[in-house]
Amino acid sequence: MYALKRDYLGHFDTFRSFQGMAIERVGVGKVSVFSGFCRSHDNNLFAGIEKRPLCPTDHEQAILLGLRAIAYESAQKRKVTVVCKALLKDVGSLMTPEIRERIEAMCAGTDLYVKRESGYYLTYYLRATRDPENAPIVVLWKVIPKNLELSTSCCICPWLDDYFERWSAESPQSIITFSVIPTSTVTHVVVTYPREIAADAEGIRKAFDDVPQLFTWIDRLAFAESEDTAVSPRLWESLSEETRQKIAFAIRHENFRGRLTPSEYPKVLSAQLIGDT
């Protein structure tokens, strides 16, 4: 699989500039396992998705996929917070003011996420596992009849381009969970979110009724809004160098790359769809 290289310090020329993300070839196990829970709790909690086939009408599975995405996102944010704090402590005085300011902002943002969003949404989804059928969680589940050769499990704020205008230190941001799970013959695309944020998620809800629109959303969420997407060697090596460069640029956090223009969004699945027509 090809995935983002998880070398947080390596992304920075600490004294001058942000260097961007590196995409590396890794084993499947490295991108499919995370240490968010001990083995015993992980096995017990996620047995519903590990020990039976995925089924679009199974609300327990959908909620567990959402919970796993939230837990994974929380674990990654904790790692970033720890690294950034250590970086600022050890060499912060040697950084340029611009780089120090950006790292301080990243650290403050991830630290707040861990303390606020993580606690709120983990509690929300853990409570939902007690009675999945009646949980106030919206489930969108589409089965694409082929292996899309990419996978991801992450959390996305559906505000997208309005994020900085709507973000507030006073209340948790809206969060949707986004999972793409390929098998040898099909790909499951699963989105979940609390019913209370349904208005914010209306755009992606509509996309589940239209495959070309859904593929456009997957391209954006997988390659421009998430740092946790993995793609098969066959898919990655089939992409043009221009598309690979777009992915490497778009996958960077908006604090560093700025807001993307429409032409800067990578077109991977949507381009395949055009080629198939």
Image (cartoon, rainbow, N blue to C red):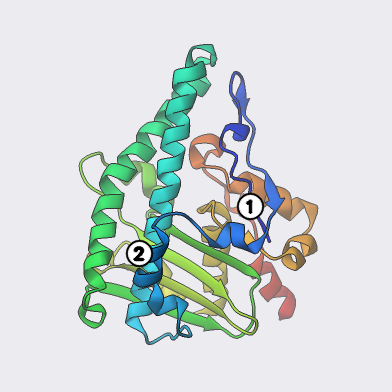
Q: Label for residue 225?
A: none
Q: CA distance from mark 1 to mark 2?
A: 44 Å
Residue 101 visible to the viewer:
yes
Q: Residues within 10 Å of mark 2 (few under 14, many from 20)?
A: few
Q: Amino acid at mark 1?
A: Ser
Q: Amino acid at mark 2?
A: His
| Residue 162 on image: x %, y % | 38, 48
What residue appears at the point 79 percent right and 52 percent down from the top-left corner?
241
Q: Is residue 69 left or right of residue 252?
A: left
Residue under label 1:
263
Q: Residues within 10 Å of mark 1 (few under 14, many from 20)?
A: few
Residue furthest out toward the front: 40
Query: Which of the 4 quarters of the picture holds residue 182?
Result: bottom right
| Residue 207 on image: x %, y % | 46, 73
| Residue 124 on image: x %, y % | 23, 62
Q: Is residue 80 above or below residue 269?
A: above
Q: Is residue 178 above or below residue 110?
A: below
Q: Are marks 1 and 2 in contact (CB under 8 Å)?
A: no
Give the structural element (helix, strand or loop) at label 1. Answer: helix
The answer to which of 77 and 240 lies nearer the viewer is 77
The answer to which of 229 and 123 lies nearer the viewer is 123
- Which quadrant, please, contains the N terminus? bottom right
What residue appears at the point 48 percent right and 85 percent down from the top-left corner?
53
Residue under label 2:
41
